[in-house]
Image: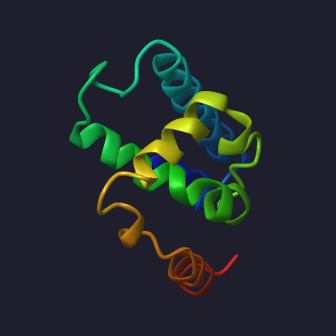
Amino acid sequence: NNGVYRSGFAQTQEAYEEAVADVFAGLDRAEDILSKQRYIASSDQITEADIRLFVTLVRFDEVYHGHFKCNKKRIADYPNLVNYTREIYQLDGISETVDMHHIKEHYHRSHPT
């Protein structure tokens, strides 16, 4: 998650390019892990790592992709990440914590481009 902020607030082109490369290396790594197992840190049990990743993934296409200029790919372009995000979202109690209108309003109002 720190990588998207490093991208969005980069002061130089070099810093931006390095941060974006890190973001997508992390997403590529998560995509690879999820091609082999159900969750990030465990093949059969959800952990805090999954919830923390979910928070980033659920915001990515709607906010980070455009607002922080992490626009090489969308989560929708990663088959395992998009399915994983959908699965986590459908767990009891998770969808109630996601208010996409609030998320978009917060980022677009508190971080002007």
Q: Is residue 44 above or below residue 10?
A: above
Q: Residue at x 51, y 22 (%)?
A: 29
In the rendering, at what x and y percent does residue 112 appear? 65, 81
Horizontal side of residue 3 vs 74, given as left or right: left
Dividing the picture into quadrants, the one containing residue 39 is top left
Q: Residue at x 47, y 12 (%)?
A: 36
In the depicted view, which residue is nearer to us: 50 or 13? Answer: 50
In the depicted view, which residue is nearer to us: 51 or 3? Answer: 51
In the rendering, at what x and y percent does residue 43 appear? 31, 18
Q: How many marks?
A: 0
Quarter of the picture containing the C terminus is bottom right
In the rendering, at what x and y percent does residue 10 appear? 61, 56
Dividing the picture into quadrants, the one containing residue 53 is top left
Q: Is residue 97 above or below residue 71?
A: below
Q: Residue at x 47, y 52 (%)?
A: 56
Horizontal side of residue 75 vs 59, given as left or right: right
Q: Residue at x 51, y 30 (%)?
A: 26
Q: Is residue 24 above or below residue 95?
A: above
Looking at the image, the residue that sits furthest to the top is: 36
Colour convention: rainbow
